[in-house]
Amino acid sequence: MFRVFLVSLLCIASSFAQARSYIDGHLHYVDFFQESEGMPALLKAMDEGNISHAAVMGIPVAKKWQEDEPKKPRYYAGDDAALYWYSATDSYLLHAIEQLKPAEQKRFFPFLSGFNANDKNSAAHIRRTLEMNPGFWQGIGEVFTRHDDVTALMHGNTPRANNEAMMKVYRVAAEFDLPVLLHSNITSKRERNPLYLEELEDALEKNPDVRFIWAHAGTSMELHRHQDELDFLLPLVKRLLAKHDNLYIDLSWTLLEPYLVDSKGKPRADWLTLFKNNPTRFVLGSDVVGRFSSVGETMQGFEPVLQALPAEVAQAIAEDNFRALLPQQAKRN
């Protein structure tokens, strides 16, 4: 359904999309089986989609092919088998980028994600990884905390944005000047209120020197399947942005409909006003996982929204804001 919707948006935006370039701020090099189409396919898709750079990351969990399942599942929700924390995802990404030519390497901002968000040892693991490859990692994440069916299938307790393990991780992020891309659902599949807001706000308040990128503003496709639009989301985002100057919002594709545009693909005026009033606080992301043919289509799907904004605000959201979130050393290169 979403892909059909994107095609209709592209018909509106096609005359503009060729002229604009994007930074994809949320792209997974591997899928939930730690498999990937590879860098040649990714670079080709980026070129075709006018994507100048991408924040690229692994996935911190792997899906088990359970002994009693006759067929390998195609996605994490394909059966009831568990997900487990998988630290080798960062090694796969590091190796893939190191094989590229120098000019190609510069198109990627690697984010480190392969750690257990419930383990208070993870901060030390992250520090060692950063020190082994100085200057390589440009951010931390996507960190999976509250994530509906993903966390329901994980071994162990559900991670929280403000648990002790993550608080230690944030201190490392601040020390190394790294932004944190955090997945923390705002609610559950059944509750129509910001059930988990306290966890996010606690992390924001106690770590004012950390730049938090909130993945799709706490929404997910699974939430949409059960609840459609969360009517409290827009006023909540407004309040959080006003209160926490270290919070940034990742507008990856699950926010596009029903929030940023209506059922006919028309940009919604209340969200446009929010972008105009907070022009430096939003970034774009495709959130693709290991397969890249749709990445350009997904990024260009934001064109109706970008075209409805002043040119300088559209440029900021499409590219400039993400670059500003990177470590100071990366911005100088």
Image (cartoon, rainbow, N blue to C red):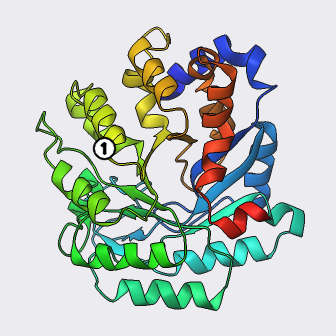
x and y percentages locating residue 223 in the rendered image: 26, 38
In the displayed structure image, the side of residue 33 where residue 99 appears, left or right: right
Residue 142 image point, x, y percent: 45, 61
Say which residue appears at 17% left-offset and 45% top-offset.
188
Q: Residue at x 59, y 49 (%)?
A: 25
Count of numbered badges drawn on the protein: 1
Question: Does residue 194 appear to the left or right of 314 in the view shown?
Answer: left
Q: Quadrant of residue 296?
A: top right
Which picture quadrant has residue 249? Answer: top left
The residue lying at 33 percent from left, 32 percent from top is 238
- Left or right, 154 with respect to 91, comes to left
- Residue 255 appears anywhere in the view: yes
Label 1 sits on residue: 243
- Picture quarter containing residue 259? top left
**Depth check: 40 or 23 in front?**
23
Label 1: which secondary element: helix
In the image, 304 versus 254, the foreground residue is 304
Q: Quadrant of the C terminus?
A: bottom right
Point out residue 127 in the picture as x, y percentages from the top left corner.
49, 87
Residue at 41 percent across and 90 percent down: it is 124
> Depth check: 332 or 284 in front?
332
- Percent across and percent down for residue 177 are 55, 71
Q: Is residue 245 above or below residue 178?
A: above
Whether residue 101 is visible, yes or no, is no
